[in-house]
Image (cartoon, rainbow, N blue to C red):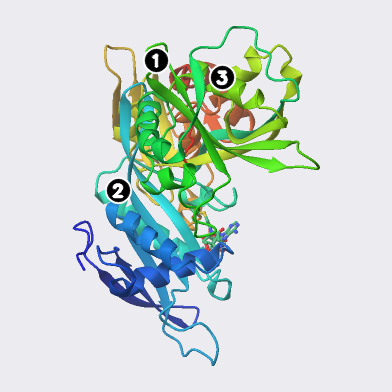
Amino acid sequence: MTTHPAHEPRSEQYNAKGNAYQVKTFGAGTGGIDENSEAVEWLRAVSQGFHGPEPSKESLEKDLVWLNGEGVRLRAVYSQDPVPRAALGDERPVATYCSWNSSLTLGADIQLPAWLVSEVTVRPTHARRGILRRMMTADLTEAHDAGFPIAALTASEATIYGRFGFGAGTFNTSVAVAAESGLKLKAPSVGRVEMADNQAVAQLAPHVFEEFHKLTPGSLTRTSKWWDYVSGQFDWHTGKADPEIRTAVHYDENERADGYVSYKFVRGNGFKGTLDVVDLVSPSAQVRIALWEYLCGLDLVTEVRHPNAQMEDPLMWGMVDMADYEVRKRYERLWLRILDPVAALSARPYRSHRKVTVSLVDSLGFADGLYTIDTTGDQPVVERVGDRPRTDDDAAGKSMPRVELPDGADVAMNIDALGSLYLGAVKASTLYYAGLIKVRDLAALDDLQSLMSTSDHPYCISPF
Ligand SMILES: CC(=O)SCCNC(=O)CCNC(=O)[C@H](O)C(C)(C)COP(=O)(O)OP(=O)(O)OC[C@H]1O[C@@H](n2cnc3c(N)ncnc32)[C@H](O)[C@@H]1OP(=O)(O)O
């Protein structure tokens, strides 16, 4: 077995609330199941933590390939206390966590290195003993020390990650579009769509996605496991191929493939049913509309549902009857954690010329301090200009200390609020009205709002 060069296996012992634990950090090697027993037990624990099935052999083998390929850093916590008869053995971690390197798109052809966190589980019998806090603090410290300006995750519950400095940074919607009589559009659609061969789409999809990723603010890179999944070659939940998935490809006027969709038909009573979109990808909103037109035009389809649609969807505005576009749910897709405000804020595009001094409160310390963002010149200049005065909450070690506006600052906020403003998912005034931003006066709020506003809503289509 060859371990990924990104990993030096590490291990430490500690006690929490009278229980003995061992924390290990390691990677998946190039070998298969027999050579990767720790990673295999880690994968089993993850599936158990999210109430998934026992992973099949094939699923474990495939997971080991992507864990190794992406250089995923695995963390596992093991109980060191005696195991009672019939309980899970001590080789099965009681907690899991992992992270890997990606990039986040901030604007057309502007990418920022991003540290992705996933597969966080703590066995309920070991919960609320600070295991998550310990793993998260160690991992974010590693990310910060390695120079990553931002970390990101997709959360199971919106209440967990604010205390670690993550703010909801992009939103998606789950939508249903009536399809009984096709999709009537106000403007003619572009190009043409053909039903496709799933295996060919598995080859094509990474290239189409790459174009989407290059141009779309909020996009993160995808791991290699996506392409088998979206083309029906392998479903990680069932551990086998999914023959119900169908695919179609969009072509421009030069026969160049510039978009694809994969979908499943869900039969109702009789022959009719609904279509569920699995993946719908193109860098062009017009091509995405053309793919919707194809789906809604399929015979026997009463409704097309997409769980990963964009917040302000051009499709709805392009429809003759926008009431046929129903938003069933709106949810936070990406949670963003700024680790280095100077690097993160220097990299993003700005549309207005302002200068604002921001006080950032960060209980983990990475981003805490006073910063100036100055876009009045040719290039944005972001500098750390000083420390933030300590408060009683800081002294008490609160994970979400109260935000105060110190002398010399125009605005003040917790670091999670900056994560929400970063890609323009929310206006600064909305967070101010929610009591999450303190301002010197309304002119300072207006400056912050102009500074952070973006031309498009961010759109991430790659949950992880
Ligand atoms: C990125 C992802 O992978 S998202 C998936 C998260 N995982 C899951 O939802 C699986 C089921 N749940 C679990 O495995 C666990 O309950 C976890 C991971 C959510 C929490 O793990 P624990 O070890 O119990 O958390 P820990 O004891 O370290 O608590 C850390 C802090 O989070 C808080 N917290 C923990 N769980 C929750 C929760 N579900 N909702 C709100 N707050 C929570 C604690 O109160 C504590 O706050 P404090 O430090 O400010 O006092």
Q: What's the amino acid at mark 2?
A: His
Vertical comparison of 102 with 251: above or below: below
In this rendering, the answer to whether 109 lies above or below 70 is above
In three-dimensional space, the C-alpha distance between marks 2 and 1, rounded to whole angstroms, equals 28 Å
Q: Give x and y (percent) for residue 151.
A: 38, 44
Q: Earlier in the sequence, mark 2 or mark 1?
A: 2
Q: Which mark is residue 144?
A: 2
Mark 1 CB within 8 Å of ligand 1: no
Mark 1 or 3 closer to N-term? Answer: 3
Q: Are marks 2 and 3 in contact (CB under 8 Å)?
A: no
Asked if residue 303 lies left or right of residue 430, the reply is: right
Amino acid at the residue labelled 1: Arg
Position above or below: 459 against 235: above
Callout 2 secondary element: helix
Which comes sooner in the sequence, label 2 or label 3? 2
Residues packed near mark 3 inside 10 Å, few (<14), some (14 to 19) or many (20 plus): many
Observer-nearest of 132 and 257: 257
Classify residue 215 by image quadrant.
top left
Task: Report which residue position mark 3 lands on.
Answer: 289
**Residue 134 seen anywhere in this rendered image of the structure:** no
Residues 72 and 231: in front is 231
Residue 186 visible within the image? yes
Q: Residue at x 48, y 69 (%)?
A: 45
Q: Residue 148 location, x and y as percent? A: 29, 43
Q: Nearer the viewer, mark 1 or mark 3?
A: 3
Residue 112 lies, in percent from the top left, at 32, 34
Residue matched to label 1: 354
Residue 368, quarter of picture? top left
Look at label 3 and name its amino acid: Ile
Instruction: Kindly identify the residue that appears in the image at 42 percent across and 36 percent down.
Output: 201
Q: Nearer the viewer, mark 2 or mark 3?
A: 3
